[in-house]
Every structure is written in structure tokens, then in C-alpha cells.
Image (tube, rainbow, N blue to C red):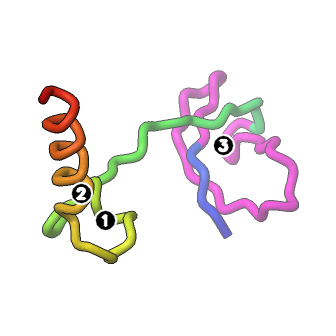
Amino acid sequence: MPTYQYFCDACSLDFEASRSFSDTSDQNCPQCEGITRKVFAPVGVHFKGSGFYRTDSRSTKGGPGEGSSTSSSSSSTSKE
């Protein structure tokens, strides 16, 4: 079950609650039974390792340099 962070406007309590996807999103404050709201925060993403390159999603037929050599030869022939 996912854990969500809530904030109570009445008593300023900041707490976490585990909620099922089928549950309603309403959550009362455990301290004062006041109305709470979900707290949204940016998600940190860390790309580690050798990296992600433009050629990672392309087919391996011909190698990663095939596209650059084809475009350079076509541009050189159009200049002549």
C-alpha cells in the first residue's frame, strides 16, 4: 500500500498514512480529527551509471555511427 503525507490546517500536524488505491483520499487528522490535505513534493531522480545516449533506443544494425555518417555524406553530395 502506498504511503501519503498529509498536513492538518487546524493543528499543523504533519503525518503519513498508508492508503489503499481503492480507499477514498479523505483522511482526518489523528490528533484533532480536523480536515487534512495531501502534501505533494517533487520526486528526486538520480541517473547513475554510464548514462543514457541518443543511440540507446535505436537498433544495433550498423552501429551507433551509422546515422551520423549517412547524414554527413548526403550533405556533402548536395554541396558538390
Position in image of residue 13 (x %, y %): 55, 36
Residue at mark 2: 53
Q: Tell me, yes or no, if residue 46 can be seen here.
A: no
Helix or strand or loop: what does disc 2 sit on?
Answer: loop
Residue at mark 1: 56
The residues colored magenta run 6-32
- The kind of residue on which mark 3 rests is Gln
Helix or strand or loop: what does disc 1 sit on?
Answer: helix
User: Counting other residues with Cα less than 10 Å from the Cα at mark 2, is it few (<14), some (14-19), or many (20 or more)?
Assistant: few
**Marker disc for residue 31:** 3
> Disc 1 and disc 3: Cα gap in Å?
51 Å
Residue depth check, mark 3 versus mark 2: number of the one nearer the observer: 2
Q: Is residue 60 left or right of residue 50?
A: right
**Is the N terminus in the top left, top right, bottom left or bottom right quadrant?**
bottom right
- The kind of residue on which mark 2 rests is Tyr
- The kind of residue on which mark 1 rests is Asp
Which quadrant holds residue 50?
bottom left
Pick whichever, 73 or 6, lies toward us.
Answer: 73
For the point 70% across and 33% down, which residue is it?
Answer: 36
Q: Is residue 62 above or below residue 8?
A: below
Q: Predominant secondary structure in magenta?
A: loop
Pick whichever, 48 or 42, lies toward us.
Answer: 48
For the point 15% across and 26% down, which residue is it?
Answer: 79
Position in image of residue 4 (x %, y %): 60, 51
Q: Is residue 51 above or below residue 75?
A: below
Q: Are marks 3 and 2 in contact (CB under 8 Å)?
A: no
Q: Is residue 7 above or below residue 1?
A: above
Q: Is residue 6 left or right of residue 55?
A: right
Q: Is residue 9 magenta?
A: yes
Q: Are marks 1 and 2 in contact (CB under 8 Å)?
A: yes
> Disc 1 and disc 2: Cα gap in Å?
5 Å
User: Counting other residues with Cα less than 10 Å from the Cα at mark 1, is it few (<14), some (14-19), or many (20 or more)?
Assistant: few
